Amino acid sequence: MRISGIRLRKLRLPLREPFEASYGVENDKVAVIVTVTADTGAVGYAECVAMSAPLYTEETVETAWYVLRTFLAPRLMGVEVSSREDLHAIGKRFSFVRGHQMAKAALEMAVWDLYAHVAGVPLHRLLGGTRSEIPVGISVGIQPDTRQLLRKVEGYLAQGFQRVKIKIKPGFDMAPVQAVRAVFPDVPLMVDANSAYTLADAEHLRRLDAFGLLMIEQPLAWDDMVDHAALQQQLETPICLDESIRSAADARKAIELGACKVVNLKLGRVGGFAEALRIHDLCQDGGLDLWCGGMLETGIGRLHNIAVTSLAGFTLPGDTAPSDRYFAEDIISPPVEFSRPGMLAVEEIPGVASRVNEAALEKWVVEETRL
């Protein structure tokens, strides 16, 4: 197949409720949806998960839009893709641009999605996945008080979610964790700090060891590994790295340093499917636990997360909740839903084109450009 057209659409969807982490609050989901067209007329979709402000990484929707339109998309026009090897090489076409992993991922993943469509192969099988269902956890944003947090957790456990992650920050950490553990002593529980602490807080963070957590996610600086390695030596609780892992090279260094025992893999953060597969293999070989994180994706991003999570090396429930956790109306039809409590089906669909609801997507578009 030959890439004959690329369409970028920026959209803004209202979230059901604000989502708060240590770095800020999101009230709307602003995303760039990339559509890549082949000379056969087939299409592939993907989602750029950059946030509207540079709070999680330095990327934003606006920087991704500019980089996609000006630098990356023109490099794909007319490119022939006829094998899985060609898919793995897509990222090399973008290597002249430093960083901007989320912009690169959106375009690269759209090509994988397109190839699955043209080949008539379910995307998860193209990636090497084998599971027919995946377990699902839930991420709970910072709440106004522990009473509301407990109410949220109780509701999610009643729905069947198999693991709970709560966001923490200085001043909102020990009390909420203690409260959740007291009421739900057996729930698989983890905490996410989003880089809110420093190595000077090691003694404070050691108190978390008492609660039998699955992990503490990214407690220290977003680009650090060395201090995380020092902290991991002082904690019984496994450290999970998120923002620090942007490539397979980063994963290799983290493993060699002993900076973590768990990796949160987000497709956008690492530049797409090909790099995600390399990180998956490194974690398998190194004996690290691996799970797929979430970025408040629309249904397009959720289906891609489900596909990659079907690989054998994903050992813990991910954050890909059903669509109605975040949106009253998703842009795929039907939306992502539980196949049974706490589980999502890995569907036998060749790419996501058959599930995209173009009318619902167009409803929220605020800007568009085509190549």
Image: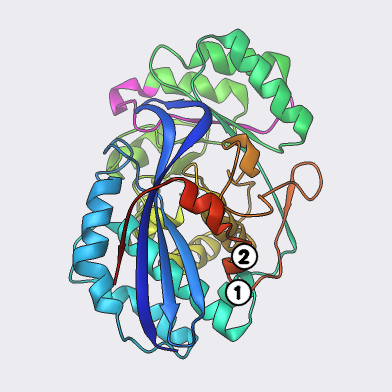
Comparing 145 with 351, the one in front is 351
| Residue 199 is covered by the magenta coloring | yes
Whichever of callouts 1 and 2 sits on the residue coming sooner in the sequence is 1
The image shows residue 264 at horizontal and vertical percentages of 48, 48
Foreground of the two, 320 or 252: 320
- Amino acid at circle 1: Gly
- Give the structural element (helix, strand or loop) at label 2: loop
User: Bounds of the magenta span?
Assistant: 185-202
Left or right: where does residue 5 sit relative to residue 319? left
Residue 344, image x and y in percent? 72, 51
Q: Is residue 345 visible?
A: yes
Question: Residue 160 got which mark?
Answer: none
**Tally of marks:** 2
The quadrant of the rendering that contains the N terminus is bottom left
Tell me what residue is drawn at x 38 percent, y 46 percent: 259
The reply to whether callout 1 and callout 2 are in contact (CB within 8 Å) is: yes
The residue where tag 2 is placed is: 311
Return the residue at label 1: 128
Residue neighbourhood size for the residue with mark 1, other residues' Cα within 10 Å, grouped as few (<14), some (14–19), many (≥20): some
Picture quadrant of residue 106: bottom left
| Vertical position of residue 38 compared to residue 242: above or below | below
Mark 1 lies on a secondary structure that is loop
